[in-house]
Amino acid sequence: MGKNAGLLPGTLDMLILKAVSLKPLHGYGVLLRIRQISGDALDIPQGSLYPALYRLEHQDLIAADWGTSDNNRKAKFYKLTTAGRRRLRDETAGWNRLAAAISSALNTTPEEV
């Protein structure tokens, strides 16, 4: 089995929000940041990323400004909006609750039931 983890439905938007909450990023930079913060476990296909960025921008969760990338190309840089910060906070809390519940269930021993 490879070291890349599969994404669960609904996680891509949350990961994008997290990535751009750390620093405004252009699209490819978002891919690299998600890979970095996941310890190289998540590799998002560009074909999934760009529709998600478009969707998040149209939901006013991220905003975009044109700038110049490190390789001197014109690029859209995405940053979190106030609504995006709120959504990220809510999504993070929900995922943390779910992860704790799953961890508890998986660590239950026969003596505990």
Image (cartoon, helix red, strand yellow):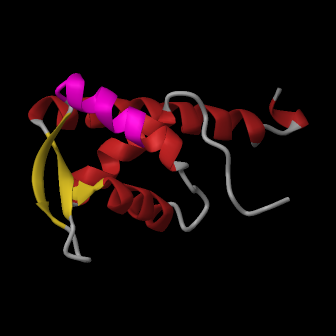
Instruction: Work out whether residue 80 can be spotted.
Output: yes
Viewport quadrant of the C terminus = top right
**Which residue is at 58% across, 55% downward?**
42
Q: Position of residue 13 (x, y in %)?
A: 40, 35
Q: Main secondary structure of the magenta part?
A: helix
**Which residue is at 23% across, 51% downward?**
21
Q: Is residue 72 above or below residue 52?
A: below
Q: Position of residue 102 (x, y in %)?
A: 66, 34
Using the image as rendered, state which of residue 29 and residue 39 is in the foreground: 29
Q: Is residue 79 magenta?
A: no
Q: Is residue 4 above or below residue 9?
A: below
Residue projecting furthest to the bottom: 71
Relative to 19, is 23 on the left or the right? left
Relative to 41, is 59 on the left or the right? left
Q: Position of residue 72 (x, y in %)?
A: 19, 75
Q: Is residue 51 magenta?
A: yes
Instruction: Work out whether residue 92 can be spotted.
Output: no
Using the image as rendered, state which of residue 46 and residue 60 is in the foreground: 46
Q: Is residue 45 above or below residue 48?
A: below
Q: Position of residue 10 (x, y in %)?
A: 50, 28
Relative to 15, is 9 on the left or the right? right
**Which residue is at 79% across, 62% downward?**
2
Using the image as rendered, state which of residue 15 and residue 107 is in the foreground: 15
Residue projecting furthest to the top: 59
- The residue segment tinted magenta is 50-60
**Which residue is at 85% across, 59% downward?**
1
